[in-house]
Amino acid sequence: MSATETLEEREIRNKRIAFILALFFASLLLINFLVISVFFTWADWVSLLIFSLLLIVPAYLSNASMVITGGGRPIDGGKLFRDGRRILGDHKTINGLKGPLYVGIPISFTLFILFILLWQPIKELVIQALGDEQYLLYNDLKFFQYYFIGGKFPMNFLVLLIRIILASYGAVIGDLFGSFLKRRFDIKSGAPFWIVDQLDFALIAMLFIIIPSFIFPKVFLFPDIYIFVFLIIITPAVSIIANTVAYLVGLKSVPY
């Protein structure tokens, strides 16, 4: 960014970037669907979508919850880093850290309890689809059982709890790391830090989620590469496309 760039020029540039990224990620989603459908089946892509969202939803909820519970004393206590800029900024507060505990984790666990209650009819539909050979990539009931309800009873409750907590607080650390980077690049609070803003929390959450699969591989499934790729596409895509559409229909003053 030029030092002489005006506020108006910066806003025009960011709007242009938002539109380009919205089209780019929409195209990536379409390409992802076509690739999975051609090499496997469209049903596999639907399962990929569901598995990915079930894996990352605690991170999404916890990331949003920090805004709900935020406010008050900043985490960095107003201190500056060695570059003379704030470590994190005023918007990253101690109260915000309570969001996952009070909102993200309880809602996530409640959601999975619902899936446990509905597992029998879901299981029957999956078994029927497996019998009809609708799946090539996810052609085993264990995938559905793990992502929907955490695996076999009663160990699944512990698996779900660990998975939810790791995803939730992984999102917190990712968000704080993104804020730290934003301050280092001297990007003001509220200004877009493209891709990093949309991906920081999800990437660290995914790293946290896979830790137990190295320690207890018989209990925790290691997410396959298709899930990782899909989450890297869908996470910024949802945010960027939704904000751009909201701007186009007049619900937001800027597309970010």
Image: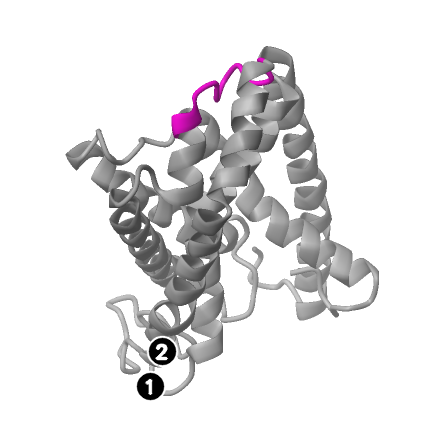
Q: Is residue 159 magenta?
A: no
Q: Name the residue under label 1.
A: 73
Report the side of 66 relative to 98 (left or right). Answer: right
**Residue 93 marker:** 2
Quarter of the picture holding the C terminus: bottom right
Q: Which residue is drawn at 46% across and 51% down?
A: 117
User: Whole-percent x and y of residue 209?
Assistant: 31, 44
Q: Does residue 8 sit above or below 197 in this rendering?
A: below
The image quarter in which residue 168 lies = bottom left
Please give the name of the residue rendered at 54% of the width and 39% of the height, measured from the top-left corner: 121
Q: Is residue 70 above or below residue 231?
A: below
Q: What element carries label 2?
A: loop
Task: Judge left or right: residue 76 versus residue 118.
Answer: left
Q: Where is residue 151 in the image (x, y as percent from the top left)?
A: 33, 38
> Main SS of the magenta segment?
loop
Q: Is residue 172 visible?
A: yes
Residue numbers of the magenta segment:
133-142
